[in-house]
Image (cartoon, rainbow, N blue to C red):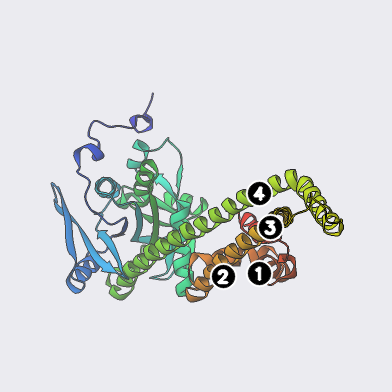
Amino acid sequence: MTYPILEYDSTQNAFIEPSKVIKLRNMPEHCVICIFREVIDKVIAEHNAKMLVENRWEDGPHPVYEISYQNQQLAFFHPGVGAPLAAGLLEEVIAFGCRKFIACGGCGVLEKDMTVGSLIVVSGAIRDEGVSYHYLLPDREVIANEVGVNALVKALSHRGVPYRVGKTWTTDAPYRETPNKIAERKKEGCLAVEMESAGMMAVAQFRGVVFGQVLYSGDDLSGTEWDNRTWQSRDEIRESLFWLCADCVNRKSEDDHAQVVYKDYVNTAKQLEREINSTFHAWKVIKGWVIAFLISGFAFQISYAVAPINKYRSKDLNAGMVIVSLIIVVSAYGIPITWVSKRNKLIREHEEIRAAEIEKPKSGFQEFYVTWKKEKSKEQLMTALSPENKRCASPFCFFDLYQFHRALGA
């Protein structure tokens, strides 16, 4: 007998396809999903939030709001409770135009040492709900989006906030969290239990958007009896989670911009490499002829200068030979001068980026350099980066710098 929940259909377009029934709007790319209603209300009241759209379901309206935060537009909404509603609302917001999501929610903890308010960055979820099976092939777990996880880890580390990275257990039945199931989930490595993660992660994966989630430790299910721990009254912690997610979204945006600029710079380096390689190849082909003409030209000029004056020798002919010789000399030395000029251009661009890194030490550039420093010695780093290094005296040695880019995997 086949169970309906296991009958996965990989057809991309459903009978009601969000992108076809929902009109694309001028929605911010970045969005915070916040499960805490009182926090949503406070942000709306204190930050002049603008309602972008109101999704209406039978239980009432589900609006999406926008605020300006750190010079960027940020969308946010409440996902409701439970995977079906959260997944449906996420589908609609994706169709409206948002592409990068960071969610904050609450959870019950399965380990005693996790105090109220301690944070969990979700790395995956046990799929003990129904929504995810309509978006992904049947499996025991759904793995979190790596980009979302890394963005949260960076934001938390930057703030110095303690956290743990781990799995959660997503269930549709909070009143059927039995001792046997709790024990089994703990054996599987779950740190927490909640009702939305697996469903939202499945939707995000199916639609190809970035999604990360951080959970706030609430009630305790690790012992023999349930302990509420008055977790819903910790307003300050719950609000700080919203702004943590907002910072995380902004930080991800800065890193995106830094990597775009960095890739543009690397593309410039590659283009210069192609130009110089082609010039160098042409120079190798004609080098022998240029040198031969140069030597013969000077030899002819010298021999002509010392030859006796006769009817074949004239001032016009002598001037012509001088001009030809100068052309040969300029051609011979002009190509290396061009190489040096292009090398200096690349070095100047590199110095500008290094200056930008100093001005914005938390940008994505610093992460590239830190990665390099971990893998290479300080001497190798300075050799690769320093334009004053003696190895850069030759026109082609500036590709030590380009080797640095390639070592970073750009």
Taking 378 as reference, is 85 left or right? left
Residue type pointed to by label 2: Glu
Label 1, label 2: how far apart the Cα atoms are: 9 Å
Residue type pointed to by label 3: Val
- Image marks 1 and 4: residues in contact by CB distance under 8 Å: no
- Image marks 1 and 2: residues in contact by CB distance under 8 Å: yes
Taking 79 as reference, is 157 left or right? right
- Asked if one can make out residue 110 in the rendered structure from this viewpoint, the answer is no
Label 1, label 4: how far apart the Cα atoms are: 22 Å
Q: Secondary structure at mark 4?
A: helix
Earlier-in-chain disc, 2 versus 3:
3
Using the image, tell me which numbered label, if any, was put on residue 198.
none
Q: In x, y percent, where is residue 367?
A: 55, 65
Q: Residue at x 48, y 65 (%)?
A: 154
Earlier-in-chain disc, 1 versus 4:
4
Earlier-in-chain disc, 1 versus 2:
2
Q: Neighbour class for label 4 at 10 Å: few (<14), some, many (≥20)?
A: some
Q: Name the residue nearer the viewer: 202 or 388.
A: 388
> In the rendered image of this protein, does residue 291 appear above or below residue 377?
above
Q: In x, y percent, where is residue 326?
A: 70, 58
Earlier-in-chain disc, 4 versus 3:
4
Label 4, label 3: how far apart the Cα atoms are: 16 Å
Using the image, tell me which numbered label, if any, was put on residue 279.
4
Identify residue for label 3: 330
Mark nearest the camera among 1 and 3 is: 3
Q: In x, y percent, where is residue 119?
A: 42, 66
